[in-house]
Image: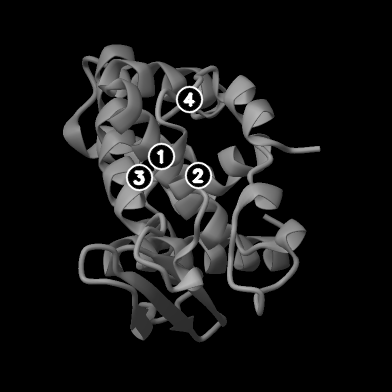
């Protein structure tokens, strides 16, 4: 059974301020003042800085563009949701009673909770502790990257161009969330199909949408 204590063991950090841990697991759907949005805002920056430092140390000679592509992949909602699942956060996240079973929470909520938890660690114990946690739990993804990933939008554009198709079109489907923590849903459409992506910026959402569509098209093509 997932508990705060088992989560702390997985993280490798025992909170001095247990209230920070509790807050990190309270989703905005609860409509209360002390939900996890502010901690998510902090955790997003902590994760970005920590991964940036780790990448500079691992790839000191890589150009900025390659490092940026690595960073985008490692701090993406997909990556954070993967970590949240490894930490077994779903049963611990408190959401509005009208939402789906906690065992089937959307990846976006899991990713937000992951970042909120990192923000809570930072406020509880400082950047070095948060960075060590990130370095440990993101190690497998860092090792699996190999060559710098290709930008998803560029890869999709090249895929379509090789097949004589027009450039894909991106459109904002929905924008929600607080001013300091916006959430975008973006659609991408082409002659070969459509897909949607989500993220805290239009750029991130577009990249996710492009990645989803490219994955689908490659699967259909048997690539």
* SS for dot 2: helix
Q: Is residue 55 left or right of residue 30?
A: left
| Residue 106 location (% of width, % of height) | 62, 64
Above or below: residue 103 compared with residue 163: above
Q: Which residue is identified by label 1?
A: 20
The reply to whether residue 149 is in sight is no
Nearest-to-viewer mark from 1 and 4: 1
Evaluate whether residue 81 shows in this view. Answer: yes
Residue 89 relative to residue 151: left or right: right
Q: What's the CA distance linking mark 1 and mark 4?
A: 28 Å
Quarter of the rendering containing residue 36: bottom left
Of labels 1 and 3, earlier in sequence is 1
Residue farthest to the right, as pictured? 1
Number of the front mark, 2 or 4: 2
Q: Is residue 203 left or right of residue 158?
A: left
Q: Nearer the viewer, mark 1 or mark 3?
A: 1
Q: Which residue is mark 4?
A: 142
Q: Position of residue 152 (x, y in %)?
A: 41, 56
Question: Residue 62's x, y, as percent?
Answer: 24, 23
Closer to the camera in the image, 117 or 136: 117
Can you say which quadrant of the picture contains the N terminus? top right
Q: Do the residues under discs 2 and 1 have CB atoms within 8 angstroms?
A: yes
Q: Which residue bears the numbered disc 3?
A: 72
Residue identifier under label 2: 22
Give neighbour class at mark 2: few <14, some 14-19, many 20+ (Cα, 10 Å). some
Q: Are marks 2 and 4 in contact (CB under 8 Å)?
A: no
Query: Gap in Å between the C-alphas at discs 2 and 4?
Result: 29 Å
User: Tag 4 or tag 1, which sits nearer the N-term?
Assistant: 1
In-front residue for pair 100/200: 100
């Amino acid at each position: 059974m997932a508990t705060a204590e088992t989560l702390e063991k997985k993280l490798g950090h025992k909170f001095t301020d247990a209230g920070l841990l509790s807050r990190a697991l309270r989703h905005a759907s609860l409509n209360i003042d002390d939900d996890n949005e502010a901690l998510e805002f902090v955790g997003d920056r902590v994760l970005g800085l920590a991964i940036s430092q780790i990448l500079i140390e691992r790839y000191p000679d890589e150009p900025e563009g390659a490092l940026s592509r690595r960073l985008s992949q490692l701090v993406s909602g997909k990556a954070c949701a993967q970590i949240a699942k490894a930490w077994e956060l779903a049963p611990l996240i408190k959401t509005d009673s009208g939402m789906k079973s906690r065992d089937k929470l959307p990846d976006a909520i899991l990713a937000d909770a992951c970042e909120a938890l990192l923000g809570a660690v930072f406020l509880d114990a400082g950047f070095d502790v948060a960075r060590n946690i990130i370095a440990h739990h993101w190690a497998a993804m860092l090792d699996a990257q190999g060559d710098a990933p290709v930008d998803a939008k560029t890869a999709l554009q090249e895929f379509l161009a090789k097949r004589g198709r027009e450039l894909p079109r991106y459109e904002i489907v929905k924008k929600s969330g607080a001013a300091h923590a916006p959430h975008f849903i973006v659609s991408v459409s082409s002659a070969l199909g459509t897909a949607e992506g989500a993220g805290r910026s239009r750029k991130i959402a577009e990249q996710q949408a492009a990645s989803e569509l490219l994955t689908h098209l490659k699967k259909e093509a048997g690539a």
